Image: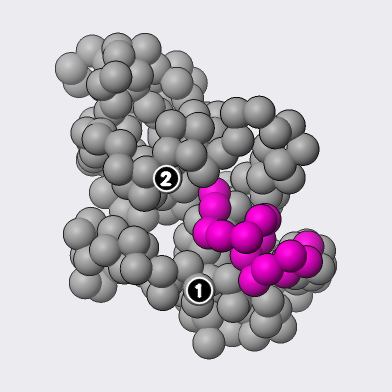
Amino acid sequence: MKLTFIYFDFPFWRAEVGRIALFMGGIDFENRLVKGDEFNRVQQTGHLDDGTSIPFHQLPCLIVDGVPIAQTAGIARFCGKLSGMYPKDDDLLAGRIDQFLDFATDITELVFLTGQGDDDLIKKAKRETLASDDLPRKLQMLEKCIGAESGWVVGPQLGLADLAIWRMMGWLSSGIVDGIPATLLSAFPKTAAVCRAVDAHPQIQDWVAKTYPDNYIRGNYG
Ligand SMILES: N[C@@H](CCC(=O)N[C@@H](CS)C(=O)NCC(=O)O)C(=O)O
């Protein structure tokens, strides 16, 4: 099976959850990195410059033997099944993992849509309000879900949900998101502990050393 993973040259969770699942499973894939000008054309035409079709004009996209698959969570499930990190015959476990992938999408959209289209000052003010009400309210719900069986989000070992939460929080607690403080995770010790545990995992350290720039945007996990 020939796999080409298409995303930008930065480790945002939408791509990392699928890319790292493939890496951890020892599955070969081409890591195709798209730059801003080519992405502008993708948004307009739905194709990469080499003609590869991108169904919803968005990234990430995974090409499987020439067939494109879009949407972060669908791609993550596909990669997770190949790597053994997502069940093929356990619907309950699958559902428990899915809820966190979709939660990460909800939080990402909540942040991106807050202040979208506003000028910078208004956007920052709206994000600050978000960071003091809706965002912590949602993150408290996540916090309550973690650690019932182990320190991981779902099940006894690092899985897709941990990867999604780790890189999403890496972004949100990095201090680069306007209006969202780098102290965000200080109120959520179990979530911060998941992020530290993912960071410390040997295969993650290997992946980070191989693919992330030295100055990549790391979160503040304590
Ligand atoms: N629902 C999609 C959203 C993907 C998405 O918004 N990707 C961003 C890049 S991180 C993008 O392509 N934005 C441009 C656009 O939506 O036109 C998913 O879950 O993958």
In the picture, measured across the screen, residue 201 lies left or right of residue 49, that is: right
**Amino acid of disc 2:** Ala
Q: Position of residue 17 (x, y in %)?
A: 46, 47
SS category of the residue bearing label 2? helix
- Say whether disc 2 or disc 1 marks the residue closer to the N-terminus: 2
SS category of the residue bearing label 1? helix
Q: Position of residue 63 (x, y in %)?
A: 34, 21
- Whether residue 38 is visible here, answered yes or no, is yes
Task: Tell me which residue sits at (66%, 56%) in the image.
Answer: 155
**How does the figure colour the protein chain or chains?**
one colour
Q: Position of residue 18 (x, y in %)?
A: 43, 41
Task: Tell me which residue sits at (72%, 69%) in the image.
Answer: 147
> Magenta residues, as a range?
145-160
- Against 120, residue 8 (above or below) is above
Residue 21 bears which disc, if any?
Answer: 2
Instruction: Find residue 137 and report its image quarter.
Output: bottom right
Residue 197 bears which disc, if any?
Answer: 1
Q: Residues within 10 Å of mark 2 (few under 14, many from 20)?
A: many
Task: Tell me which residue sits at (68%, 76%) in the image.
Answer: 190
In the picture, measured across the screen, residue 92 lies left or right of residue 21, that is: right
**Amino acid of disc 1:** Ala
Residue 151 part of the magenta segment? yes
> Closer to the camera, 84 or 58?
84
Instruction: Find residue 169 and report its image quarter.
Output: bottom right
Q: How many marks?
A: 2
